[in-house]
Amino acid sequence: MLTGTPRGSFRPMDLGAELDEALRLLAAGRDLLLERPHDETAPAALRARDWDDALGAMDDEALAAAERDPAGWLAVHGPAELRPLAGDAAALIARHREPPADPRPQGAALHVAARKKTQIGAFVEVLTELEGAERVVDFGSGHGHLTRALGEALRADTLGVERDPALVARARELGGRFVRADAEGFALQPGDVVVGLHPCGSLGDALVRRAREAGAHVLMVSCCFQKVPGPERTWLAERAAGFALPRDVLGLANLAPRSFRNSGSLEAKRGWRQNRLAVRRLLLARGIPLGPGDEGRGVTKERFRAGLADAAARSLERRGLPPASEDELRTAAAEAARIHARVARFALPRHALARVLELAIVLDRAVHLEEAGWAAEVRTLFSPETSPRNLAVVGRAPA
């Protein structure tokens, strides 16, 4: 049995009403979400609302301030007709913003990053609150760092569940109990507490669904929301029935408007975005038809961080195309540098809804539990400097 004092930024609130508000804002800005700016021409949604001139005229100092807090900045300084939407988004975000001081790091392994240890420490503190938990089951356990740390700190029965056989083998070498299985096939039991530290996309949805089916407690912080099968995510809560956004839009929820530890400066991130834009210009010059975000398909963020040449090589290789010449790379880089500033300005209204989108998905999962009798909460578990993906679903199963 695990008991203790509450951990995390939590205030009693109506989760259903919060979800309704998030979905209302996303519906109001749906046209903004669907069209990702990628050249000097403002998206049709901005032109239709007559916001393009005001955004395009922003100076560099205003842009830098707006990129740090898009919703908050636009609520005060944006075009007059944009301010109500941005203000409501900023108010929702603020209700889920401030975490407590980061907890004491947990996990003795030397090769585990410091910020990962801090995240594990937050999980340890929350798990001490859950009464009646008989077993901790870590879905998507990877190398097992969280699984082992929870077992050591809580002196509890812990089990890692991972579908990748290579990761299972490595986790077993490092110590602890691990099984090869996927979330849909693993048998949970009443009294289990199912945990996930940044399970990607559909794994987060499966974790919540399976816990509800089994009568298990839940502690999860999610990420990579676009990693779902099919063209759209299936929303879980009854009150979200009928709501839909394309999978490509869901990636916006991963936006990090501030730098977190060891993630690179905001200036460096602008350079990486410019590399991505340059790859897009190169592919278009080759006559490759592209949809929103297609230039990044199959190209990891590490490739874009490594530089334009590396990212372009991978993007062309996966399409079976010959490598780019030096002239092509120079031309693409010059075009990207020329248009990036306008793209960044035109992206601000869309970016103002990024955290709202993340909140909508997290609240959808919490409300799905609440609708079945769980005592559910959404908490901001650790600082955005530790990780910008810091929204936790905490669900206590009914007795």
Image (tube, rainbow, N blue to C red):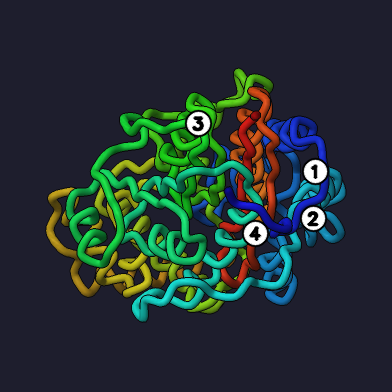
Tell me the CA gap for discs 1 and 4. Answer: 27 Å
| Whether label 1 touches label 3, CB < 8 Å | no
Disc 2: CA contacts within 10 A as few (<14), some (14-19) or many (>=20)? few
Q: Could you tell me if residue 340 is visible in this image?
A: no
Disc 1: which residue = 85
Disc 4: which residue = 381
Which quarter of the picture shows residue 342?
bottom right
On residue 190, the disc is 3
Q: Which x, y percent locates residue 257?
A: 62, 64
Circle nearer the N terminus (4, 3): 3
Circle nearer the N terminus (3, 2): 2
Tell me the CA gap for discs 3 and 2. Answer: 35 Å
Q: Nearer the viewer, mark 1 or mark 3?
A: 3
Q: Amino acid at mark 2?
A: Ala
**Secondary structure type for disc 4:** loop
Q: Which x, y percent locates residue 93?
A: 75, 52
Q: Amino acid at mark 1?
A: Leu
Q: Quadrant of the C terminus?
A: top right
Q: Nearer the viewer, mark 2 or mark 1?
A: 2
Tell me the CA gap for discs 2 and 1. Answer: 14 Å
Circle nearer the N terminus (2, 1): 1
On residue 94, the disc is 2
Question: Residue drawn at (53%, 53%), measured in percent from left and top?
Answer: 254
Question: Residue drawn at (31%, 67%), measured in percent from left and top?
Answer: 303
Front-lying residue, 233 or 322: 233
